[in-house]
Image (cartoon, coloured by chain):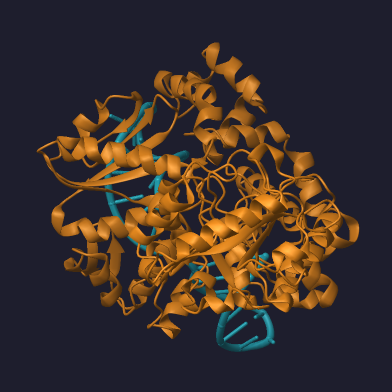
Amino acid sequence: MENQKIAKIFSETSDILEILGDSRFKIRAYRQASQTIETYPYHLRDIYEDDPKKLDDIPGIGKALMGKIIEIFETGDCRKHVDLVRKIKPGVLDILRLRGIGPKKTKLFLDELGIDSVVKLKDAAKRGLLRELPGMGEKSEDDVLLAIESYGRLTARMPMYQALSIAEGIIDYLKVNKKVKKATYAGSLRRRLETIGDIDILACGSPKIIGDFCDMPGVAHVEAKGDTKATVILESGIQVDLRVVPEESFGAALYYFTGSKAHNIATRKIAQKKGMKINEYGVFKGKKSVAGKTEDEIFKKIGLPYIIPEMREDTGEIEFMKKNPRFKPLEESDIQGDLHSHTDWSDGKSSLAEMAEAAQARGYKYLAITDHSQSVKVAHGMEVPRLEKQLLEIDKLNKGFKGFRLLKGCEVDILKDGSLDMPDSILEKLDIVVASVHTYFQLPEKEQTTRIIKAIQNPFVTLLAHPTGKLTGMREAYDVDLLKVMRAAKKAQVAIELNCNPFRLDLDTKHLRAARDMGVMVSLGTDSHSASHLEFIEYGIAMAHRGWLQPENILNCQKCIDFIRKNH
DNA sequence: GGACTCCTGTCCTAGTGCTCCAAAGCACT
């Protein structure tokens, strides 16, 4: 939590410096530091308590920012930030966040009309005061009002699976159009971020596509419309950007449009040093295009191995891939089985046989049946006798399988005191024990952490499921020191789950990276509640890509399922 | 502000499209 606080202080500092017209390099330094800290997998406090000087080792943190981080730990605040906040009212920062309004216009409104809040801005726009300002007109004034009205809707992010479904719908719509030769989605959706701010679509074909796109059903408002790109807002409030490029530039445009911005800048810089230029039309030597049809071609031209979209965040992937050109990201065929599923014995919809059939259809060697334990009444959790009955049923089914088996398991609730919801006498009969939290989300961090660590120290536990309890866009993670939990998990030889259910996607990228660095085994589980949910594994694979995981980091990729039964 | 090179100073992270007002701001990755 303290990392987030520091990131926010630095982010606000950069925003205020921008309005005040300070050095753009200083502004960038604060902004970059904020972003680095926000996604940094380790607690800055741990580093500070170990040796404050080591804060300087974090990329983008130098002597000055290190001093400010130390100041925040020692005094609870940062003098410079406090002074800046005094200079500019917080309402001014709200204006800066409106679409179409940047630091220049924010400063203009403040200096000329004393506007220091969105409410005052709205009032001034309605009274026609803004149009009198230099560089403003009637249209700009209307745009300000529109930006204020749509602010809440346009800043909301949606879960990735929702964006994926909308994007696929748009692509289907475009592809039936004969003017469209190719269409695909790019941006953060292609990089498989857990939440998506807007949808980016790339197409090849006639420029008339732009008009058809803007007339598409479900478009509420056309924000911009030119010869090669358009931006629309859907009725649902989602922004969709379309870019149309010539076919020979498709690879370059896909690369540009996939991002991230930081990754693009980093590779464009590499190209510059080699006397080339990368833009969305290709790689250029002087005016001559030397690559652009495919992404692969672009990487080759600038001397890099292909980097998969999910890794393109400029968080070290370029250096990593240079050093490890043979790095092979996880593939679906590496997955030997699914380690978290439910049936109609608890709150699932499918039978044991249906789940087994679906798992075999995917080519799995095993599927862990992990129905809920007794205390989860709403999910028809199983008491010991019913679980024993299920185990007999699984034995019976397993006799009929060849090269496949159902693993006997249970998703056992972690009780408030860290004990497990099922006695050891039944746990020892299982192939796999999945421990998880479904209650007491509000415990203080220390208590929650201790509770979970106690649970995974039970010798029969195989893995900790959905380790933070977050539900994308609906429920925040509970307070837990996950690094401490992971250290304990490593010691206890317990795996940490990457829950592939698109509502969860728990662990997130930074903790997956940390798990990888720490050598903690990660388990992919779809948490399927029906046979069709087994396909959620694809979301997990994408998340594994974002966490740079390879088959050796993943429990499900181990061919030997005896590993799962570590205590048998 | 950082990073790097040198110790006081220099450079720093790309490249392009759209809009609205008539050059620049803001947007996109």
Residue A319 vertical position relative to residue A359 in the rendered view, above or below: below
Residue A286, percent from left and from top: 21, 69
On screen, residue A59 versus residue A501, left or right, reads right
Residue A83, percent from left and from top: 80, 47
Which quadrant of the view contains residue A191? Answer: bottom left
Q: Most extreme residue toward the top, as rendered?
A: A127
Examine the rendering and report whether any part of residue A543 can be seen: no
**Rendering colour (chain B):** cyan
Which quadrant of the view contains residue A199? Answer: top left
Residue A489 vertical position relative to residue A144 in the rendered view, above or below: below
Q: Most extreme residue toward the left, as rendered?
A: A178
On screen, residue A401 versus residue A207, left or right, reads right
Residue A463, percent from left and from top: 65, 65
Instruction: Say which residue appears at 79% left-offset and 40% top-offset.
Output: A86
Residue A318, percent from left and from top: 44, 74
Choose between A145 and A427: the one closer to the eye.
Answer: A427
Residue A27 vertical position relative to residue A270 in the rendered view, above or below: above
Choose between A111 and A384: the one closer to the eye.
Answer: A384
Instruction: Say which residue appears at 58% left-offset and 63% top-offset.
Output: A408
Residue A422 vertical position relative to residue A142 in the rendered view, above or below: below
Chain rendered orange: A
- Count the marks: 0
Q: The N terminus of chain A is located in which quarter?
A: bottom right
